[in-house]
Image: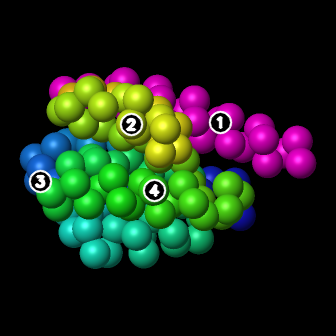
Amino acid sequence: MNVEAKPRIVIIENDFPTLELYRRELSSEYEVLATLDGTEALAMAQMAGVQAVVLEPALGGGKGWDLLATLSQAAVAESPPVILCSTSDERRKGMALGAAAFLVKPVLPTTLHQVLQRIIGRRAAAATDS
């Protein structure tokens, strides 16, 4: 992998202004793939090189929860960590389904960036240990 390459993240969000805010603010540090569409979300999240997924679990009437469960069932090495960003504080449910972090909206892009750095850094450290 190119040393200069930005970490690739996927943002799956049902609110277009929020999606654009995250994309704009995070694109200086990350290669950001973003979608409002639940059907393409799984394919994007499983693309090679994805370091983390930012997910709104209320996507498509709650289909985000199904997506989280699907990603969590994949082998740990193959599935990127998922950060949930939701207006409902369902932290227990999210963590029980395998989320790496849970943030209650409104989420400032700087806060999201800090959580991404921590989670991607932890994953990179684990990969070098094995």
* Residue under numbered circle 1: 121
> In terms of sequence position, does the residue under pointer 2 or pointer 4 come before the other?
4
* Residue under numbered circle 4: 69
Q: Residues within 10 Å of mark 3 (few under 14, many from 20)?
A: few
* Residue under numbered circle 3: 16
The span picked out in magenta is 106-130
Principal secondary structure, stretch drawn in magenta: helix
> In terms of sequence position, does the residue under pointer 2 or pointer 3 come before the other?
3
Vertical side of 37 occupied by 105: above or below: above
**Residue type for callout 4:** Ala
Q: Nearer the viewer, residue 16 or 87?
A: 87
Magenta stretch encompasses residue 121:
yes
Vertical side of 24 occupied by 119: above or below: above
Task: Locate residue 80, reporting x and y percent.
Answer: 56, 54
Label 2 to label 4, Cα distance in Å? 11 Å
Task: Locate residue 66, reporting x and y percent.
Answer: 36, 60
Q: Nearer the viewer, residue 103 or 120?
A: 103
Helix, strand or loop at label 2? It is helix
Helix, strand or loop at label 4? It is helix
**Residue type for callout 3:** Phe
Helix, strand or loop at label 1? It is helix
**Residue type for callout 2:** Lys
* Residue under numbered circle 2: 93
